[in-house]
Amino acid sequence: MPDRFLADEAATESLGEELARHTPPGGTWLLHGALGAGKTTWTRGFLKGLGGDPDEAASPTYAVLHRYATPSGHLFHLDLYRPGPAGAWTLGLEEQLGPEDRLVVEWAGPEGPWPTDWVGELTLSPEAAGRRAEWTWPDQSPAP
């Protein structure tokens, strides 16, 4: 399982940007971590890595779902804190996602069904003055 110490928000965004470049169209990331762990910060970098505007990224806690345009499809940013893990499918999400889109899910449960077989998981945990990122992803993905 790859891992990295992230000293600050810039490092967290940088990891998101880096992992975006290794995420194929249709890819899904399940994000884990306590409130304030950096999930939305990581997503801001991920959006930038896809060529989208990172300034648009905001926590979807109250909106539940944000959709951001990128040059190669959309990034759907979903927060299941309030609706629970099954909440994604009450939104009709599977009907909105196109084959070029990517999905980032905060507070994801252990099961989907997620829209494709490519599913990565990222856990952000406090460590010293920063945070530790640990992730897994399908075997066909190159290591950053």
Image (cartoon, rainbow, N blue to C red):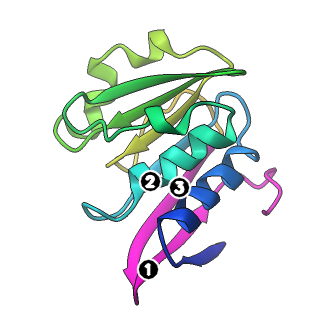
Residue 131 picture quarter = bottom left
Image marks 2 and 3: residues in contact by CB distance under 8 Å: no
Q: Residues within 10 Å of mark 1 (few under 14, many from 20)?
A: some
**Residue hosting label 1:** 130
For the point 53% across and 16% down, which residue is it?
A: 97
Viewer-nearest residue: 22 or 1: 22
Which amino acid type is shown beneath numbered disc 2? Thr
Q: Residues within 10 Å of mark 3 (few under 14, many from 20)?
A: some
Viewer-nearest residue: 98 or 129: 129
The quarter of the image holding the N terminus is: bottom right
Which amino acid type is shown beneath numbered disc 1? Gly
Image marks 1 and 3: residues in contact by CB distance under 8 Å: no
| Residue 46 to residue 33: above or below | above
| Residue 57 at x, y percent in the picture | 43, 37
For the point 26% across and 30% down, which residue is it?
A: 64
For the point 28% across and 40% down, which residue is it?
A: 85
| Residue 132 at x, y percent in the picture | 49, 77
Measure the C-alpha gap from mark 1 to mark 2: 13 Å
| Residue 67 to residue 116: above or below | above
**Residue hosting label 3:** 121
- Residue 129 forms part of the magenta stretch: yes
Which amino acid type is shown beneath numbered disc 3? Glu
Q: Is residue 55 left or right of residue 138?
A: left
| Residue 114 to residue 142: above or below | above
User: Which label sits on residue 86?
Assistant: none
User: Which label sits on residue 41?
Assistant: 2
The quarter of the image holding the C terminus is: bottom right
